[in-house]
Image (cartoon, helix red, strand yellow):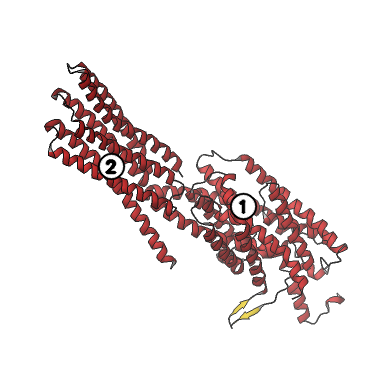
Amino acid sequence: MEITVLLFLTSGLFLGWALGANDAANVFGTAVGTRMVRFGTAAAICSIFVVLGAVVSGAGAAHTLGKLGAINALAGSFMAALAAALAVYIMTKAGLPVSTSQAIVGAIIGWNLFSGMPTDPKSLTKILSTWVLCPVLAACFSAIIYKTTVWFIKYAKLHLLRTDAYTRIGLLIAGAFGSYSLGANNIANVMGVFVPANPFTDFNLGTFLTFSAGQQLFLLGAVAIGVGVFTYSKRVMLTVGNDLLPLSPIAAWVAVVSHSIVLFLFASQGLEALLSSHGLPTIPLVPVSSSQAVVGAVLGIALVKGGGGIQWRVLGSIGLGWIVTPIIACGICFVGLYFLQNVFDQKVYQSTAIERLDPAPTTSRMRDHQIDIMKL
Amino acid sequence: MQLGKDVRLFGRTRDLEIQIDQFLDALSESALVFKSAVDVYLEEGCTKEFTDKHEHVDSLESQADDLRRTIEIKLYTQTLIPESRGDVLGLLENLDKIINLIERVLWAFDIEKPQIPTPLNSGYRKLVDMSCEAVEAVVLASRAFFRNIDAVGDHNHKVMYFETEADKASTQLKRDIFETDLRLGHKMHLRGFVEDIDDIADWSEDVADRLAIYVIKRTV
């Protein structure tokens, strides 16, 4: 592999690092903040399960992102990921809640605008509607789970200490599930833009096991997320509880479980296959915002408790983030691509009409039929 | 090995649950022994039976002290219930003070041997009864705090009732004391005992008030 390829991948790794630093707090923030789980334990579990989720079920959401705009040159992928990472960085510095999902979608649209590729309206609508659906769904889940949990605790009359012990284990399991879902759903944000221009190749482990190029790419991205978790998420975890509504450990558990279910639903190809095989409407596989899922979940709990104590200003700034993040990322990507193309003389897109539609399978089929692509 | 660690974790939790129950048992038992010790004193004076009961309360007090220390150390070293351990610590220390008050009254009976005129016996009995009922109710409220938080309010309500009754009994008893023909010094001596016994009910009420706040804090 050329050194430039690695260089181009660094922006994705940077984005992965930023995601690990920020979003691990959504999964383990309250658990660590309330000292129910030690940071070391949380970081280890988070990293392992993020990697597992990314490698095992990361492909679904990445596919949708790929359909939105198939960035077909590595330099273009580099710029898209860098623009998203910078947007995340700027928004974090400005103290606004940020979503890597929205940043990367903005960046892809920026690439589409620059390269003159059409933005698939179906995929865009699918993604945009999911962003609204994600917190709403998380709120519904958390409201139901919260009510059930409170009822169960009352009914079971568990000792305070026993409840504490169960909550700890519950937080660890929910955290592991949350990390898996985060990896499965959000790896698309980190590495999705590199999929069409993937520099890796498949290799076989033994006879049956194939470690696909996509999985290698996702593993790399997930490792970057893990590094972000270990190096920078502690600070975020310790402050996360103060931003929204102060949560008890049990409410925190409910929030993490609801968040994780939502992220899992939007990433699970298995579930999609199951639903479609029974003729049921499927859930779109889209990268959603982990932060917004948690906000939705906390809101669900707050509403069930009577709606008191909700920081409406925080909610307002989240709404603002929905609009501002993609625009910033789109702008940075557009300007960045211009510089990359004209100053650094890099090929940021390939403008063949065939590849614009569905590059890899079509071209390979044409080659199989010995059709000369260049003549077309 | 994770499973083994978890099993031990629940084992430790169970041990601690048992120790908290034992602490509350010691408090409840000391109130019951206190009541019968005062009964014996009022009937027979400072007899061997009274001294035995006093010693019993002494041993319960040191047992409760040991348990409280062990529980507190475990809560902090094992970083258990991080959200409520400050409250649990405060609760245990305040409950422990009730046993200390009970012990102090018995020591006063033992050392000062107050001469209580027979007509005042019923007044003392009533005061002791109400104070011990208040202690019983606060023990139940504390147990509920650990196991059934919704029931804390019901028990707290009883604590308030018995504390009010104890106050009424102590006021009446003080009036009765000062209406007798005893010497002023003797009257003041007897009044001191009334106040000490009433303190037990007052302190129980203070613990109940704190419990009410802890419950609000713990509502998930």
In percent of width and height, residue A97 lies at: 66, 49
Q: Quadrant of the C terminus of chain A?
A: bottom right
Check disc 1 and report the residue beneath it: A291
In this view, the residue in front, A292 or B202, is B202
Q: Which mark is residue A32?
A: none
Q: Quadrant of the N terminus of chain A?
A: bottom right
Helix, strand or loop at label 1? It is helix
Q: Nearer the viewer, mark 1 or mark 2?
A: 2
User: Is residue A80 visible in this depiction of the protein?
Assistant: yes
Q: Disc 2 marks which amino acid?
A: Leu
Up/down of B123 relative to B50, above or below = above
Image quadrant in which you'd find residue B39: top left
Q: Disc 1 marks which amino acid?
A: Ser
In percent of width and height, residue B97 lies at: 33, 38
- Chain letter for mark 2, please: B
Label 1 – label 2 distance at C-alpha: 49 Å
In this view, the residue in front, A86 or A238, is A238
What residue lies at 28% left-to-right and 45% top-to-bottom?
A: B62
In this view, the residue in front, A309 or A273, is A309
Check disc 2 and report the residue beneath it: B27
Image quadrant in which you'd find residue A192: bottom right
Q: Residues within 10 Å of mark 2 (few under 14, many from 20)?
A: many
Helix, strand or loop at label 2? It is helix
In percent of width and height, residue A227 lies at: 63, 63
In percent of width and height, residue B68 lies at: 34, 47
Pointers 1 and 2 within a single chain:
no
Q: Residues within 10 Å of mark 1 (few under 14, many from 20)?
A: many
What residue lies at 78% left-to-right and 80% top-to-bottom?
A: A367
- Is A298 situated left or right of A108 in this image? left
